Amino acid sequence: MTLYWTSVEFDILNPAAYEDCIGGFVYLFLNARDVQDAMEIIKADVEEEDLKINQIEFVAPYEGVPWDSKEDQLLYDALAAEAASGNEVVWDEISAYESKDD
């Protein structure tokens, strides 16, 4: 298995459940056999949250990814470590927006 990370942009199908936001984006961390397997896991996990994928920006192995700040490095390395230790998709905090103009 390989530890992957991805950036997903999505529409919110039930805005009332997300403080009336209509869309957003999020980083996800997960274990998968390959990129195709990762894509299937990502789609299933996002749909389970009542979200509709607009775009998957990338799916890449999370191996030595450099971040701009030490704080970001610690945060994302911790999320990646959590995903590496299990079979669950680990979500970063969702960045949601109330309109397509935001």
Image (spheres, rainbow, N blue to C red):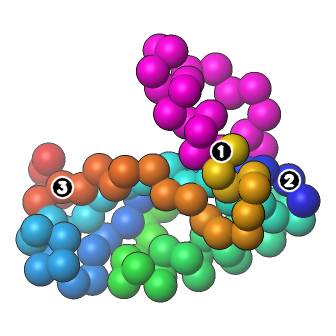
**39, 33: nearer the viewer:** 33
Q: Is residue 58 visible?
A: no
* Left or right of residue 6, residue 32 in this image: right
Q: Position of residue 31 (x, y in %)?
A: 77, 60
Q: Amino acid at mark 1?
A: Ala
* Mark with earlier residue (1, 3): 1
Residue lying at 64% horizontally and 20% vertically, measured from the top left = 66
x and y, in percent, of residue 67 in the image: 55, 21
Q: Which residue is mark 2?
A: 2
**N-term mark: 2 or 3:** 2
Q: Is residue 64 visible?
A: yes
- Residue 63 painted magenta: yes
| Region in magenta | 60-80
Q: Is residue 55 magenta?
A: no
Picture coordinates of residue 32, whole percent (x, y): 81, 64
**Element assignment for label 3:** strand
Q: Report which residue position mark 3 lands on.
A: 97
Give the residue number, with chain letter if any, for mark 1: 80
Count of marks placed on residues: 3
Specify which label sits upstream in the sequence, 1 or 2. 2
Report the residue that reaches farthest toward the top.
Answer: 69
How many residues crowd mark 2 within 10 Å: few (<14), some (14–19), many (20+)? some
